[in-house]
Image (spheres, rainbow, N blue to C red):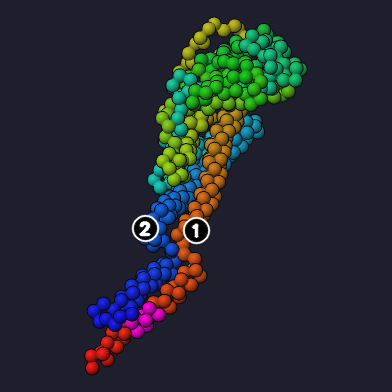
Amino acid sequence: MAMVVKNNMSAVNTLNTLNKNQSELSKSLQKVSSGMKINSAGDDASGMAISERMRVQVRALDQDDVNTNNGSALLRTAEGAVQSTIEILKTLKDKAINAANDTNTDEDRALIQKEVDRLIDQIDDNALTTYNGKYLVDGSKNGLVVGPTGKGTHTCYTNTSLSEDTFGGTLLTRLKRRDGNDVGIHSSDTLTASWVKNGVTYTRSISPIATTNLTSAIRLITESHAKLTNTDALIGLDEYGRAVYTPDNKPGVTIQANDPGVDGQVSGLTFAVTDNSGKMRNEVNAVLDAFKETIRAQNPSPDNSMIFQTGTKANQAVKVGFTDMRSVALGLQSATGEGWNHLPLPPPLTPLPPRFGDVHVVGGGPKVQVTTKDAANAAINVFENALIKATDQAVAIGAAQNRLGYTSSNLVVASENVQASESTIRDSDMAKEMTAYTKHNVLTQSAQAMLAQANQNSSAVLSLLQ
């Protein structure tokens, strides 16, 4: 190799190698110090893009889990209010059963009524429960309610204890049980019905029953408040306008309130049969008084359900609506706070045979009354129906809580798996990187030493110039 001084190629080559080693050493040092093998797009452009999308997804999943937990807290708050109302309704039913007992005097029943009034007021207080300033069960967060005519739903009561071939023209004396045996109503018996509407308790009797059929009895007993609608499996239309059928899809006898919405609801319906000596016919009443509320009266409402965002994409959410848990919506008092005005009741829509008695008010409202034995008996079914409404809401809330619980578990697992995938792409293998760091460190030091030697080669030319 020629001895030159202008271009020391050995030093130049060594310098280039040194620079490469220092660059690799710097990258290794960055990977070791950060714990990531991709610190910039230059390290792995596609890998960085993929891992960044995964990081976004992980953060979104974690926020979804926070949303889910907050939603569960809101549902627990609503559940607490509903459970408190359920406990109050249990107490109210106890009070009604107590007031129906003739060991109590009218003064005793008046005292019980005072307690009933206060408990109903507490139900309204429960309905004002809030979470983060939002009212939950006061009806403001109700789901969509349309009903069959767009004016809300009608109260419906269905009896599935009567024979499947029962229809409106069936005589009361020929009613049969589900098993085909006679109900046992005699033509000389008396049928008394009690019902509650807007806090006022009405009662009316047919004596004797004679040849009254089912349609006539129900139409005349309930006056203009309700009527017999269906004797097949169809019960009516729910809040979405969808058909509702009996649980076993077999025919039942359905009584429906004439007017839709809360103002039109019949919150309690009770039938009792006595023989010509006034003795209660319990075996008959067990069948005839088996009308259960199957569709709840609700006012028309837009869809104000609460939305819990639980997904990483738009509109991936859980929707929960809360029905109205105020006493008016539960049928425990009138919406206006006014009871019976003590004016004579309007005449019946059709002329009545002599055996049909006049309609009597035995509880003047505005809250459900237990001040008389007849009113207390009617109140038992009113509180039972209110319990069904409150329990249905508690079940709906519990189901939503379970769903959010499963959603939270799924989000945690998904976040963990996505994070594991992102780690595979972006995280450094520290053992491997330390090995590379050590190698590049040694090579850098070696290149520095050789560069010093290469620079010494030029000094050998001086010996030729002496």
Residue 8's place in the image compared with 53, above or below, is below
Q: Quadrant of residue 160?
A: top right
List x then y, in percent, for residue 354: 60, 7
Q: Amino acid at mark 2?
A: Ala
Q: Residue at 53% across / 15% down in the picture?
A: 223
Residue that protrudes farthest toward the bottom in the picture: 466
Q: Quadrant of the N terminus?
A: bottom left
Q: Residue at 57% across / 15% down in the picture?
A: 229
Crowdedness near tag 2: few (<14), some (14–19) or many (≥20) residues, C-alpha within 10 Å: few
Q: Which sits in the foreground, 417 or 307?
A: 417
Q: Residue at 60% across / 29% down in the picture?
A: 381
List x then y, in percent, for residue 375: 57, 27
Q: Which sits in the foreground, 310 or 240?
A: 310
Q: Which sits in the foreground, 408 or 3?
A: 3
Q: Which residues are magenta?
A: 446-454
Q: Which sits in the foreground, 324 or 84?
A: 324
Disc 2 designates what residue?
Answer: 41
Residue that protrudes farthest toward the right in the picture: 181
Residue 258 magenta: no
- Can you see residue 75? yes
Q: Quadrant of the C terminus?
A: bottom left
In the shown orientation, is residue 326 left or right of residue 231?
left
